[in-house]
């Protein structure tokens, strides 16, 4: 399927609905940009390279969706990664060839998410779960062990939820070491949501694009600086784009 793309700052986001994505996501790396990603993408060259290599780049953010209406071709909808994953395993619940591995969250939480999802679906669609140690991506021996665990699980879908840009970089670095895995997803706090240890914003907050504020109120120490200081830069960059003044910092002039 050839999917049209919309440029926001220095990345191309696929203009696709959730139903179209569910029907066509058979292979590749799925990453879900939001405002925070786009700010990081102005300085992090390695993260930018990951975006260039990913097969699926899908809008996670209601804010990006709303702002895209100011562009020539707006996005059809926002597809938050956490709700997409729920839709994904429900879509594949009767497909015995869909076998998912959960990698991420704090100790014990990935296993709890696995148990809850399998009970909900009525079969063992989640074939394995593991919560890596803090800073695991810098520990070659642990990464080797994770690759072994995933390969031995028989999974063909891997969800990595350890936060951006760590999860996306880890996937791209090691994807070729897991040849039986068709789909990789970098989906942040999704494992916590599925385990029930972190609650998503009420539907109204989600609908009006304020899920980020709800999460900030729940975790102010961790998220206040990200949302109210770091991510505010995005609006400056986006204004430059609207004025045709934005320049990709990683593009050779």
Image (spheres, grey):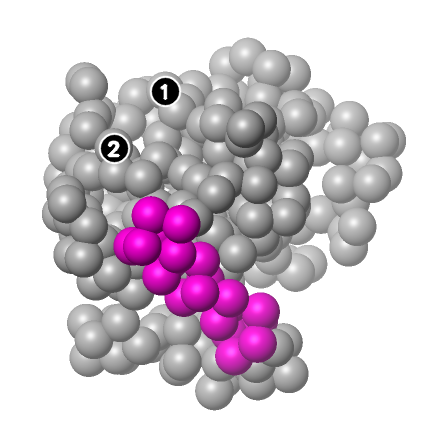
Judging depth in this view, the residue of 80 and 6 nearest the camera is 6
Residue 241: in magenta span: yes
User: Mark number for residue 75?
Assistant: none
Quarter assignment of residue 17: top left
Quadrant (top left, top right, bottom left, bottom right) of the N terminus: top left
- Viewer-closest of 95 and 70: 70
**Relative to 224, residue 248 above or below:** above
Mark 1 Cα-neighbour bin, 10 Å: few <14, some 14–19, many ≥20: some
Residue 184 lies in the magenta-colored region: no
Q: CA distance from mark 2 to mark 1?
A: 18 Å
Residue 234, above or below 85: below
Element class at badge 1? loop
State which tag comes first along the sequence, 2 or 1.
2
**Residue 74, position in %: x, y?**
16, 48
Q: Residues within 10 Å of mark 2 (few under 14, many from 20)?
A: some
Residue at 44 percent across and 58 percent down: it is 237
Can residue 180 be seen at all in this image of the molecule? yes
Residue at x 47% of width, y 52% of height: 38
In the rendered structure, the answer to whether residue 164 lies left or right of residue 196 reads right
Helix or strand or loop: what does disc 2 sit on?
strand
- Name which residue lies at 60% across and 15% down: 176
The range drawn in magenta is: 226-245
Residue 143 on image: x %, y %? 76, 32
Q: What number is the disc on residue 27?
A: 1
Dominant secondary-structure state across the stretch colored magenta: helix
* Residue position for label 2: 5
Q: Residue at x 64, y 37 (%)?
A: 45
- 81 displayed left or right of 163: left
Q: Nearer the viewer, residue 203 or 2?
A: 2
Which corner quadrant of the image does residue 229 belong to? bottom right
Does residue 93 appear left or right of residue 44 in this picture? Answer: left
Q: Quadrant of residue 177?
A: top right
């Amino acid at each position: 399927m050839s999917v049209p793309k919309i440029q926001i700052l220095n990345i191309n986001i696929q203009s696709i609905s959730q139903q179209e994505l569910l029907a066509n996501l058979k292979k590749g790396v799925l990453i879900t940009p939001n405002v925070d990603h786009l700010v990081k993408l102005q300085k992090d060259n390695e993260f930018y390279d990951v975006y260039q290599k990913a097969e699926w780049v899908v809008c996670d953010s209601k804010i990006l969706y709303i702002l895209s209406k100011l562009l020539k071709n707006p996005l059809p909808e926002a597809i938050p990664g956490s709700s997409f994953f729920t839709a994904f395993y429900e879509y594949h619940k009767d497909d015995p060839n869909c076998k998912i591995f959960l990698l991420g969250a704090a100790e014990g939480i990935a296993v709890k998410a696995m148990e809850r999802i399998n009970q909900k679906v009525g079969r063992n669609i989640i074939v394995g779960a593991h919560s890596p140690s803090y800073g695991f991506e810098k520990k070659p021996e642990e990464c080797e062990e994770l690759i072994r665990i995933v390969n031995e699980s028989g999974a063909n879908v891997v969800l990595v939820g350890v936060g951006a840009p760590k999860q996306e970089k880890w996937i791209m670095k090691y994807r070729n070491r897991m040849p039986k895995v068709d789909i990789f997803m970098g989906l942040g706090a999704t494992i916590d949501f599925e385990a029930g240890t972190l609650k998503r914003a009420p539907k109204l907050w989600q609908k009006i694009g304020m899920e980020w504020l709800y999460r900030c109120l729940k975790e102010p120490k961790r998220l206040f600086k990200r949302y109210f200081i770091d991510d505010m830069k995005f609006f400056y960059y986006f204004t430059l784009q609207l004025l045709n003044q934005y320049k990709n910092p990683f593009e050779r002039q």
